[in-house]
Image (cartoon, rainbow, N blue to C red):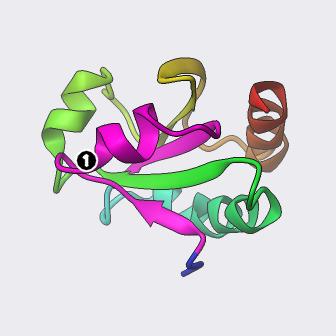
Amino acid sequence: MSEKVLHAGDSNFDATVLQSSEPVLVDFWAPWCGPCKAIGPIVEQLAEQYDGKAKVVKVDVQEFPSLGVRYNVRSIPMLLMFKDGQVHSSQLGAPPNIKSLLTQMIDKAI
């Protein structure tokens, strides 16, 4: 796993995501989720590609269900783009063109 991908939970989500000076792509996922695992390498690539411009954070909703509730995560994978502490855009699921969709989300937030 890329060291550029950060992990957040109940104790550090606000500091890592909401108070970030950079836009943050948050991947809400769970270890048992097949599509989540499928997009994992893409999320890691984006973390490397946008290093210094945007953060990439993963939140395990099985381990931290309160964060899933807080952001109305009803299905995973769900990716939210945060900018200035607010949700800027979102992507639900893992369509075949997920990398280009996520790239567009990040580019619009930078």
- Residue for badge 1: 61
| 92 w.r.t. 20: above or below | above
Q: Residues within 10 Å of mark 1 (few under 14, many from 20)?
A: many
Magenta segment includes 19: yes
Figure quadrant of the C terminus: top right
Residue at the image point whose x is 60% and y is 70% from the top: 4
Q: Nearer the viewer, residue 49 or 16?
A: 16
Q: Taking 105 as reference, is 61 left or right?
A: left
Residue 103 at x, y percent in the picture? 81, 42
Q: Is residue 53 above or below residue 75?
A: below
Which image quadrant is residue 43 in? bottom right
**Residue 85 picture location, percent across and down:** 47, 24
Q: Which quarter of the figure has residue 52? A: bottom right
* Quadrant position of the N terminus in the picture: bottom right
Q: Identify the amino acid type marked 1.
A: Val
Indicate the secondary structure of the residue bearing disc 1. Answer: loop
Left or right for 47, reference 63: right
**Which residue is located at x 33 percent, y 28 percent?**
73
Q: Is residue 87 above or below residue 106?
A: above
Q: Position of residue 13 (x, y in %)?
A: 31, 44
Q: Which residues are magenta?
A: 4-29
Q: Answer left or right for 83 relative to 19.
A: right
Q: Residue at x 85, y 43 (%)?
A: 100
Q: State the image quarter where residue 107 is shown.
A: top right
